[in-house]
Amino acid sequence: MGDRSTQDGQSERRAKRYLLAPLCAAALWGGMYVVSKWGFGAIPPLTLAFIRVVLGAATLFVLVRLTKPTRSFGRAEWYRFGMLAVWVAVTMATQFLGTALTTASQGALLTVLTPVFTLVLAVRLLGESLTRSKLSGMALATIGTVVVVGDRYGVNVAGGQLYGIGLLLLASLGWAAYTVYGKPLVRRYSALETATYSTILAVPMLGVLVPIELASVSIDLIGILGRPAVLGAVVYLGVFSTAIAWYLWYKGLEYVDAGTVAVFFFAQPVVGVALGVVVLGETVSPLFVIGGVVMAIGISVVSSAR
């Protein structure tokens, strides 16, 4: 009995420790706000999504080769990786196109739906428990994040293009599906391998859209990528906010439920604004602080829920 109790305690401590992984992923995604301030935004959305995924896939592949044994996956496994790749491609394409067609407030508010979609899918598809504590924590995190976003950008959803809002809703659903459907593969293999092979398979799916987009615009892509600010932003997007962040996001799934991991997505806009204060010298109001505290309490409640 004592040995079992000790093992359970060790597993619980390990799970709590690995909750830092999705939190770090959200922090890296929040950093994209600061990166964009450094001159990014000159590349068309689908081309940008493609470049991001290519860099992310290359980085992940190198890490897999250095740290994991060579595996021979069967057709069923490749099919599952391929389905995850579809969700990657859908998420990246709709997120970047939707962002281009909407305002900052609309984009930030709609991404709040990602953890909500994830929780719903995890309950329905994975049979995860939906406790009162988890619901309460998710509600608190949602309210806090909406307060933060509303304080930062103002709340204006009605003024945007309906098409862009629809794309961002699809992007939120796509990332929720990527999270939930990836859990069985993460548990069977590893977070790194699942993130790697799903990202690699997404490259050609996004690649077929690039010539179509570039045919409709007139830009010097090589010249644009030669600008230091743009090149640095692209590297951040591909290496840090894709390869490293996606691995960290899946790493949390090795030990805790998808619904618990999802709540850390709420930290993204808070981290983005906080980095803007530290790096760019921007200011925040007391309302932002209140919203951030409420969001943090919500995350804490979900993380400790059983």
Image (cartoon, rainbow, N blue to C red):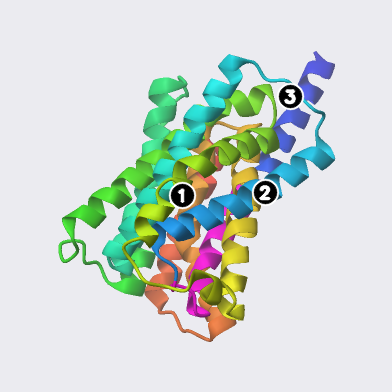
- Asked if the stretch drawn in magenta spans residue 40, the answer is yes
Task: Determine the CA span between mark 1 and mark 2.
Answer: 36 Å
* Vertical side of 161 occupied by 220: above or below: below
Main secondary structure type of the part rendered in magenta: helix
- Give the foreground label among 1 and 2: 2
Residue at left offset 59%, top offset 44%: 249
Name the amino acid type tagged 3.
Asp
Q: Position of residue 14 (x, y in %)?
A: 74, 36
Name the amino acid type tagged 1.
Gly
Residue at left offset 69%, top offset 31%: 190
**Magenta segment, which residues?**
20-42
Circle 3 residue = 8
Label 2, secondary structure: give it.
helix
Circle 2 residue = 58
Marks 3/1 in contact by CB < 8 Å: the verdict is no
Q: Is residue 221 left or right of residue 91?
A: right
Marks 3/2 in contact by CB < 8 Å: the verdict is no
Mark 3 and mark 2 lie on one chain; the one further toward the N terminus is: 3
Quarter in which the N terminus is drawn: top right
Q: Position of residue 140 (x, y in %)?
A: 39, 50
Circle 1 residue = 298
Q: Please name whichever residue, 49 or 285, is drawn nearer the observer in this view of the structure.
A: 49
Mark 3, Cα crowd under 10 Å, few <14 / some 14-19 / many 20+, is few
Mark 1, Cα crowd under 10 Å, few <14 / some 14-19 / many 20+, is many
Residue at left offset 79%, top offset 39%: 65
Residue at left offset 48%, top offset 84%: 282
